[in-house]
Image (cartoon, rainbow, N blue to C red):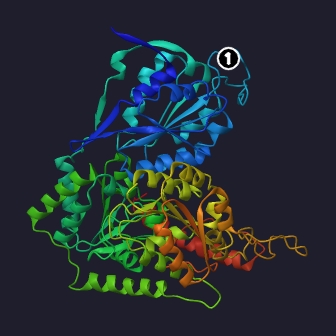
């Protein structure tokens, strides 16, 4: 056997540089590079390997460990999980900074490879700098915190263990049913240790992502449920995007006259004005979608994991509704006591279409009913886009101006606050892949980092981060990385003076508002109820090198959007909007915990209302044998 002597770090990079995936006969280099922040625990091991022997892997210098993992996840999401960046950190604080982003990737089923430094495997320098000591179990370290948020976790305590660990990591990263964060803990001494690796370990490997076909009996069972229905409704999730099944979904819906609703991850799979697209469903859904959901007798979930926002805390549907669940992930197909159809979305749609076509099936919606529902919602969006106030900019008006100003191929990125609700209801995408929402975890701080990752993935498109002031303040570090890398990226920052989404939720359940606005402390009350903090976000971004504009009127906003489109680098628009001018309602409900005991009559009343609604949802989904 021919071998080559390398350090474990050198071998890891050499291996990663030779990994490819194949989808429908098209081959992609899987690992594009490594994003990293060097420190104690990785700079002299993996850092030296990246300096001296990176192969064709690109190194990108992160500024915050969480931010760089968000960027890597967004890159993979925008590339439909066919290409990734690995991420490396030091031990201790540097590693733990990646945990939140690791969970974000796993929840959203996005592949990211994490390579945190770890304690010395030999334990001779003990406790080493930044070591977390666990007296009851000395095998544990800070990196063990990645176990619950990783789809695969391993610790390489001998250099030869890399061979099996790396292959297992690739198995999970390239499996559409199992993918998520993969963590390989790298003790800092082992990173530098040498081993005679077999040359065959570094051969080019092509991981074929095969389209899993559905079982024939499963198709028959699913088709039988649908053919017995008169008012079926499709819920399209992110799995439709990843399977490139947009055309198949459109053909399926058109042939049988079935309306389509979208999750946050599924939005843009159909153009907003497609005759069967009823828009977002659930807590942040449209009136058209939510009313159809209440009246549906069968829900056909395709590539969705049925989060509580999609199901409106399991209150969105009728008591006797049935579910047909098409998903590559078997666990998702069994949710809501559904009829499972475990398969690739494209393969599953085509199989169902064939079965329904043979039966001569057609839905029973009345002529003109769906067009009427869609027209009603279009009129409502037009109204919200036109709202004005003498006090300042209305958030829905701002989104309307932005939507009208952007090109159809432009990509928007968002994640948390009131913007995801407004965008799922109001945004009008024309092309697939232009609506990039991280709402599986709704992780504040994803927006700027995610937009940087999306811009890396889509260098020929304009990418916009839509972010509130709260999320921007939490994590904006990769704005500097975007400047460093020379990408074109525009941040649209809607400043509404605080965490207004949660402020609205709070006040909607009996609170007078507490601790969610960016105000000075009031001397008399001792609470944060004084004047709003005046924050110049444009000046902040400009201090890092971004081109900036300020907008407090529609005219200023239009002009800034026009000028920013021509700017080749990183820019930020500081847009001042009125608090509380977001959308809500539209016959949806979300279950939250409201105190049964409180000094406030309003809180007690809200708790009683919540208890009644929760009981209704429990009756529908527990007493009838559903989850």
Q: Is residue 324 left or right of residue 311?
A: left
Q: Quadrant of the C terminus?
A: bottom left
Q: Residue at x 70, y 79 (%)?
A: 602
Number of residue marks = 1
Q: In this orientation, which residue lies closer to the viewer: 72 or 44? A: 44
Location of residue 588 in the rendering, given as x and y in whole percent from the top left corner = 48, 75
> Please, is residue 235 above or below residue 142 in the view?
below
Q: In this orientation, which residue lies closer to the viewer: 247 or 27? A: 27
What element does badge 1 sit on? loop
Q: Is residue 191 left or right of residue 224?
A: right
Q: Is residue 155 left or right of residue 392?
A: left
* Residue 244 in view here: yes
Location of residue 315 in the rendering, given as x and y in whole percent from the top left corner = 45, 70
Q: Is residue 494 left or right of residue 303?
A: right
* Res 22 quadrant in image: top left
Q: In this orientation, which residue lies closer to the viewer: 372 or 323? A: 372
> Please, is residue 126 above or below residue 311 in the view?
above
Location of residue 620 in the rendering, given as x and y in whole percent from the top left corner = 43, 67
Location of residue 3 in the rendering, given as x and y in whole percent from the top left corner = 38, 11
Q: How many neighbours does mark 1 have within 10 angstroms: few (below 14), some (14-19), or many (20 or more)?
A: few
Q: Residue at x 45, y 43 (%)?
A: 180
Q: Residue at x 23, y 66 (%)?
A: 250
* Res 625 quadrant in image: bottom left
Q: Quadrant of the N terminus?
A: top left
> Please, is residue 569 above or below residue 136 in the view?
below
- Furthest residue toward right: 524
Residue that mark 1 sits on:
123
* Residue 586 in view here: no
- Furthest residue toward bottom: 390
């Amino acid at each position: 056997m021919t071998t080559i002597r390398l350090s474990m770090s050198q071998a890891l990079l050499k291996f990663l540089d030779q990994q490819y995936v194949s989808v429908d006969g098209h081959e992609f280099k899987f690992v594009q590079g490594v994003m990293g922040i060097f420190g104690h625990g990785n700079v002299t091991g993996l850092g030296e390997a990246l300096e001296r022997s990176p192969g064709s892997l690109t190194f990108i210098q992160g500024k915050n460990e969480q931010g760089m993992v968000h960027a890597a996840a967004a890159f993979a999401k925008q590339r439909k999980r066919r290409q990734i960046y690995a991420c490396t950190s030091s031990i201790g604080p540097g590693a733990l900074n990646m945990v939140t982003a690791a969970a974000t990737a796993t929840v959203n089923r996005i592949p990211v490879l994490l390579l945190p430094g770890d304690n010395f495997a030999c334990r001779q320098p003990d406790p080493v700098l930044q070591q977390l000591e666990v007296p009851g179990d000395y095998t544990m370290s800070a990196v063990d915190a990645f176990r619950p948020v990783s789809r695969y976790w391993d610790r390489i305590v001998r250099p030869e263990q890399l061979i099996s660990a790396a292959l297992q990591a690739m198995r999970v990263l390239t499996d559409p049913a199992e993918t998520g964060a993969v963590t390989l803990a790298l003790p800092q001494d082992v990173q530098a240790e040498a081993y005679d690796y077999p040359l065959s370990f570094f051969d080019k490997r092509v991981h074929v992502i095969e389209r899993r076909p559905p079982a024939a009996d499963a198709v028959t069972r699913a088709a039988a449920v649908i053919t017995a229905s008169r008012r079926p409704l499709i819920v399209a999730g992110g799995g439709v995007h990843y399977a490139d099944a947009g055309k198949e979904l459109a053909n399926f819906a058109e042939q049988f006259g079935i309306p389509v609703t979208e999750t946050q991850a599924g939005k843009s799979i159909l153009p907003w004005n497609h005759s069967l697209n009823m828009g977002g469903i659930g807590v942040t859904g449209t009136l058209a979608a939510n009313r159809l959901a209440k009246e549906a007798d069968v829900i056909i979930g395709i590539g969705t994991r049925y989060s509580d926002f999609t199901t409106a805390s399991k209150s969105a549907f009728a008591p006797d509704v049935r579910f047909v669940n098409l998903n590559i992930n078997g666990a998702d197909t069994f949710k809501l006591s559904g009829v499972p159809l475990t398969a690739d979305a494209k393969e599953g749609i085509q199989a169902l279409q064939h079965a329904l076509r043979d039966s001569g099936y057609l839905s029973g919606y009345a002529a003109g009913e769906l067009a009427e529902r869609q027209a009603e919602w279009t009129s409502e969006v037009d109204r919200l886009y036109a709202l004005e106030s003498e006090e300042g900019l209305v958030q829905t008006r701002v989104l309307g101006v932005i939507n009208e100003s952007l090109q159809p191929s432009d990509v928007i990125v968002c994640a948390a606050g009131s913007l995801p609700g407004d965008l799922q209801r109001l945004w009008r995408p024309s092309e697939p892949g232009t609506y990039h929402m991280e709402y599986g975890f709704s992780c504040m701080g994803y927006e700027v980092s995610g937009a940087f990752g999306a811009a890396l993935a889509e260098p020929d498109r304009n990418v916009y981060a839509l972010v509130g002031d709260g999320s921007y303040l939490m994590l904006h570090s990769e704005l500097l990385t975007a400047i460093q890398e020379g990408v074109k990226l525009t941040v649209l920052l809607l400043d509404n003076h605080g965490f207004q989404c949660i402020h609205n939720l709070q006040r909607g359940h009996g609170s007078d508002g507490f601790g969610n606005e960016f105000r000075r402390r009031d001397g008399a009350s001792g609470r944060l109820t004084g004047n709003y903090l005046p924050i110049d976000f444009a000046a902040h971004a400009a201090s890092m090198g971004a081109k900036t504009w300020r907008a407090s009127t529609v005219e200023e906003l239009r002009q800034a959007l026009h000028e920013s489109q021509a700017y080749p680098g990183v820019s930020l628009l500081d847009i001042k909007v009125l608090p509380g001018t977001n959308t809500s309602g539209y016959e949806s409900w979300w279950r939250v915990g409201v105190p049964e005991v409180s000094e406030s009559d309003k809180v007690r009343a809200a708790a009683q209302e919540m208890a009644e609604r929760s009981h209704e949802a429990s009756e529908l989904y527990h007493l009838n044998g559903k989850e």
